[in-house]
Amino acid sequence: MNRKLLTATIIVASFGIVGTAQTAGDVAAGKTKSARCVACHGAEGQGIPPNPAIAGKPATEQVQALKDYKSGSRTNPVMKAMASALNDQDMEDLSAYYASLK
């Protein structure tokens, strides 16, 4: 294999590894952090009307929704307050947990 191709392959592979490490949430940590979510979204993320079910939704969508609530680009006073208390890792962990549920 020529040297340039090998170098390019290593660089591209490292982006994939870094990207995965930075966006992966911890399901167990998310379960622990979910105590505040249960009142509106249920013990298994099934939703308590009028609140939506979040179980099984893709983690990336859930992270984006939390970030949108925190920034104010999505409006819901309760979710704004909840999301404002979360850092990026909390959002990743919670989203990984709820995405893991069926």
Image (spheres, rainbow, N blue to C red):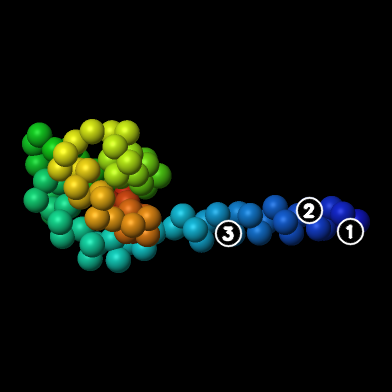
The tag on residue 3 is: 1
Specify whether 48 is left or right of 69.
left
Amino acid marked by disc 1: Arg
At mark 3, the secondary structure is helix
Q: Amino acid at mark 3?
A: Val
The residue that label 3 is drawn on is 18
N-terminal label among 3 and 2:
2
Image point (28%, 33%), residue name: 74
The residue under the point 74% across, 59% down is 10
- The residue sitting at 55% across, 54% down in the picture is 19
Dot 2: element: helix
Say the numbered circle drawn on residue 8: 2
Q: Which x, y percent locates residue 77?
A: 16, 39
Q: Position of residue 61 (x, y in %)?
A: 37, 40
Marked residue nearer the N-terminal end (2 or 1): 1
Q: Nearer the viewer, mark 1 or mark 3?
A: 3
Q: Earlier in the sequence, mark 1 or mark 3?
A: 1
**Where is the N terminus found, in terms of image quarters?**
bottom right
Q: Secondary structure at mark 1?
A: helix
Find the distance from the CA under tag 3 to the CA under tag 2. 16 Å
Q: Residues within 10 Å of mark 2 (few under 14, many from 20)?
A: few
Pointer 1: residues within 10 angstroms few (<14), some, or many (20+)?
few
Answer with left or right where residue 95 lies relative to residue 49.
Answer: right
